[in-house]
Image (cartoon, rainbow, N blue to C red):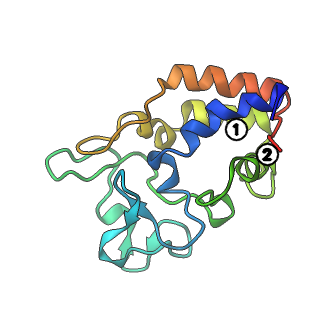
């Protein structure tokens, strides 16, 4: 990997963090904690990525962290669609999935930057609450790295 493709490394460092990967599984089962454990209580994706009927994500996860209970929360808490499952992908595969509109929610690079810059659920990764490690790269630094990668055309490593 060399040149512009190197720009994806710092972006991948963030996307591979448990705060992102736990909600971007390549299965119907979300993960939780810094250790990426299978979600307790047999929680499943469900038909709209918001939990199974009778066990919606919102039953526990509200629009903000519930510090006393230790339950994380953010607006529109849900799993990423299955097409956006990143867990287990190598960096080249992750990059290609991220830049493929069929796999990324029909977003171009500008829309990806917008999504990762302002979406409250994405921003939650930097303020996850009790007993969860926030993404270690400051969000403002991540956005700068993401923009540099996007401005170069979203190059992917080999």
Question: Residue 59: image x %, image y %?
Answer: 31, 65
Q: Is residue 21 above or below residue 150?
A: below
Question: Residue 124: image x %, image y %?
Answer: 42, 39
Q: Nearer the viewer, mark 1 or mark 2?
A: 2
Q: Secondary structure at mark 1?
A: helix
Give the left or right position of residue 29, taking residue 58 as reference. Answer: right
Q: Is residue 1 above or below residue 84?
A: above
Checking the image for residue 8, the label placed there is: none
- The residue nearer to you, when weighing 97 against 57, is 97
Circle 2 residues within 10 Å: few <14, some 14–19, many ≥20: many
Circle 1 residues within 10 Å: few <14, some 14–19, many ≥20: some
Residue at 37%, 64% in the rendered image:
37
Q: Quadrant of residue 157?
A: top right
**Residue bearing mark 1:** 112
- The residue nearer to you, when weighing 43 against 57, is 43
Q: Residue furthest front?
A: 1
Q: CA distance from mark 1 to mark 2?
A: 9 Å
Checking the image for residue 99, the label placed there is: 2
Residue at 57%, 26% in the rendered image:
142
Q: Are marks 1 and 2 in contact (CB under 8 Å)?
A: yes
Residue at 60%, 67% in the rendered image:
26
Question: Residue 99: image x %, image y %?
Answer: 79, 45
Q: Secondary structure at mark 2?
A: helix
Q: Quadrant of residue 15?
A: top right
Q: Is residue 85 above or below residue 145?
A: below
């Amino acid at each position: 990997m060399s040149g512009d493709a190197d720009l994806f490394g710092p972006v991948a460092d963030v996307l591979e963090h448990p705060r992102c990967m736990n909600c971007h599984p390549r299965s119907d089962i979300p993960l939780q904690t810094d250790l990426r454990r299978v979600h307790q209580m047999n929680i499943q994706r469900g038909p709209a990525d918001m939990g199974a009927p009778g066990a919606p994500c919102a039953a526990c996860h509200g629009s903000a962290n519930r510090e006393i209970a230790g339950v994380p929360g953010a607006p529109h808490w849900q799993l990423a669609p299955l097409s956006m499952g990143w867990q287990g992908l190598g960096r080249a595969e992750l990059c290609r999935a991220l830049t493929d509109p069929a796999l990324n929610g029909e977003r171009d690079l500008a829309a990806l930057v917008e999504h990762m810059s302002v979406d409250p659920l994405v921003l939650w990764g930097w303020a996850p609450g009790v007993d969860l490690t926030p993404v270690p790269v400051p969000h403002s630094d991540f956005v700068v790295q993401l923009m540099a990668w996007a401005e170069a055309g979203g190059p992917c490593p080999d």
